[in-house]
Image: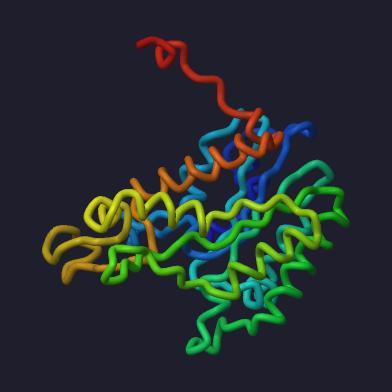
Amino acid sequence: MFRTLSVFTLMLFSGLSYAADMTQVFMAGDSTMSIKEVKDYPETGWGVPFSYFFAEDIVVDNRARNGRSTRTFKSEGRWQGIMDELQAGDYVFIQFGHNDQSEHKKDRYTPPADFGKNLEGFIADVRGKKAEPILLTPITRRYFNEQGVIEPTHGVYADLVRDVASEQKVTLLDMEAITREYFQAMGDDLSALRFMHIAPDLHPNYPIGVNDNTHLNHLGAREVAQLVLTELKRQDHPLAKQLRTPDPKHLKR
């Protein structure tokens, strides 16, 4: 339960003060972005390493949760929770699609038309608070075909994110295309080292092993987070200029 508290509340518990000039970066999304429970390690959402990239006046508040779609993120009150704390000048990263497209899982499935409307509603809500929405296509799944090519699996859902971003003139980070190209270049064996592939009897959380081509491990999450930052830099986004000051010893070769 403590994990669900806001960054502001956690600061109060830890004795830290929240400065009015701090910028909040909220993250709304699914398991590929979210903070994990210890029982699921080494599975890691890319939002975890991403939160360490920024200067101390940038507060990254990762609200992503496993299994959530745009529909359930709203119906469970998670989106409203962000809206309650969002301030002018803040940012909201919005990455959905993995679960929205799961037609066989009725608890999370969102038809394409509703998915697009939900994204538009998120954008309007964020802009209504004078904050900035940033849309991301869902990161790729790691499915190589017989020709050694990663198959796109998000179909119309990734395209809808692109279309809504274009129509609404919102910053788009096309992480489906970026991560697919990145893991494609690695090939089958090296890319597997970035996902949840563990043989039996090696990790206490997965005694029978796991072979998961959707979820990232620590290494994969860090690399995807770096790809997100690289894309922000490529687009000359203001957040890419508000990074941590490196330790001087890290500036020496």
Residue visible at 54% across and 63% down in the picture: 138
Q: Position of residue 36 (x, y in %)?
A: 43, 58
Against 238, is 10 above or below? Answer: below
Residue visible at 34% across and 63% down in the picture: 149
Residue visible at 54% across and 54% down in the picture: 175
Which quadrant, please, contains the C terminus? top left
Against 76, is 175 above or below? Answer: above
Q: How many marks?
A: 0
Q: Residue furthest left?
A: 201
Which quarter of the picture shows residue 205?
A: bottom left
From the viewer's perspective, tell me whether residue 50 is left or right of residue 125: left
Colouring used for the render: rainbow
Q: Position of residue 166 (x, y in %)?
A: 75, 59
Against 89, is 63 above or below? Answer: below
Q: Position of residue 185 (x, y in %)?
A: 35, 49
From the viewer's perspective, tell me whether residue 4 is left or right of residue 187: right
* Residue 107 vs residue 121, the one in the foreground: 121
* Residue 13 vs residue 96, the one in the foreground: 96
Residue visible at 74% across and 65% down in the picture: 164
Q: Position of residue 150 (x, y in %)?
A: 37, 64
Q: Residue furthest front?
A: 147
